[in-house]
Image: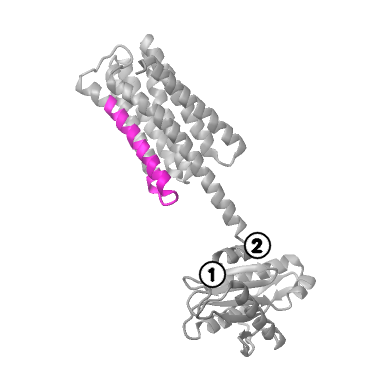
Amino acid sequence: MLDFQSLLLAAALSGACLSVTMLVIWTATRQSRYFLTASMGLALLAMHVVAFWRYGIEPRPWLGALTLALLPTGFSLILIAAAQFYGRSEVTRQAPLAVGLSILSTTFLMVVGLDGAAFMAEYLWSTILLVWIGWIFWQNRAEFPALIVLMSTLFGICSVSFALCGIVLLVDGRWVLGGAPDNWAERINIIISVACLTALGALPMTMHNLRAAARHRSEALTDALTGLRNRRALVEDYPKKAFGEQMAVVMFDLDHFKNTNDVHGHSTGDDVLRRFAEVMSGSLRAGDSAFRLGGEEFALVIARVEGNYVEATARRILVDFAAEEIVTPAGPLRCTVSAGVAFGKPGGVTLSDMLTRADRALYEAKRAGRNRVAVDGWIAGPVHRPARRA
């Protein structure tokens, strides 16, 4: 029930406030450049609304050309912001070309006196850019399905409202206007723009916060040195009596690791830990998981016990690691590791019980001479290093 001027004022204020909000967010998270880009785009959209209002009062060609240039430029910056959000660098190269074509076409039509046709062209380019933005989000809907479906829908609604403005002018044959267009489609477009701008400003901030929370959680559950999941992740992944008869835990402990640190230094010790983590990861089957428990202790959770798969996997890791050669200032270094295996039970047992039993088996392997696997009291023979290749 508001008049056209009030609707324009609401659109300008909405865009300006969102621009300032995103700019403030960017100052706190400088690495998130899409907030800065989106802030600039929203500022240009707010300027477009002001210029549109002024052109309605004073319809000069240069002001009309400026009005028509601001809208697609603002949308193109929001397009680039969406591309930055998802690492789509090719879009940042393509968007300026679309904007350039838009400005050239609308400026030419405005200069030759066809301001109505210029507005039709502007609405066409705006529709294309809005659909393009929505498509970028839609392609990445797997990250936040509900939010991105909503966001793509809003961009789709906005694009339809701009297309409708151009269609009304085309159907009415308004090639020459002599001022800013003012019809029912324009009023609907402004109402939709105000509503959608508010939502489209809030949703990216929500997705940014969710993404940051997910990253922080991942970092909290990941061992920084090796990239494996840590003990906290192991506890969270296997609560209560999670270990039935089809599951097993293998604990590994690097042999004489303190001596490695004392003789070769902690930097070399870190290299040894990383190398063992790589060997473990390379032996994983789908469904199995590797963890670093702390220090030189690691754990492997076997999700499906089949035949002697658990023992064979543990021994293969021992063999592969014994074959690794770590370069040090004192010359090449080779290390070994011992392993202890515990199997789950039909009624299910707790993680604590599994780790206790696997640790007990690991102790037996070390007491028997290291570089071997112990399985519930049974101790395999030592793993022999392969002969060094010439």
Percent x, y of residue 20? 54, 28
Q: Which residue is depicted at the point 74% across and 78% down? A: 256
Q: Which residue is depicted at the point 65% across and 83% down? A: 361
Which amino acid, by three-letter code, is at mark 2? Leu
Query: What sort of colour scheme is used for the picture?
Result: one colour
Kindly give the residue lying farthest to the right in the view shown.
Answer: 262
Percent x, y of residue 95? 41, 36
Please name the residue that numbered disc 2 is placed on: 225
Secondary element at tag 1: strand
Q: Which residue is depicted at the point 39% across and 15% down? A: 5
Q: Is residue 161 magenta?
A: yes
Dividing the picture into quadrants, the one containing residue 316 is: bottom right
Q: CA distance from mark 2 to mark 1?
A: 17 Å
Q: Quadrant of the C terminus?
A: bottom right
Mark 2: few/some/many CA within 10 Å (<14, 14-19, 20+) = few
Q: Which residue is depicted at the point 51% across and 31% down? A: 39
Which amino acid, by three-letter code, is at mark 1? Ser
Above or below 361: residue 203: above
Above or below 273: residue 122: above
Mark 1: few/some/many CA within 10 Å (<14, 14-19, 20+) = some
Q: Which residues are magenta?
A: 137-165
Kindly give the residue lying farthest to the top in the view shown.
Answer: 58
Q: Do we see residue 144 in this rendering?
A: yes
**Nearer to the camera, 82 or 20:** 20
Percent x, y of residue 130? 36, 35
Secondary element at tag 2: loop
Percent x, y of residue 189? 33, 26
Above or below 80: residue 17: above
Please name the residue that numbered disc 1 is placed on: 289
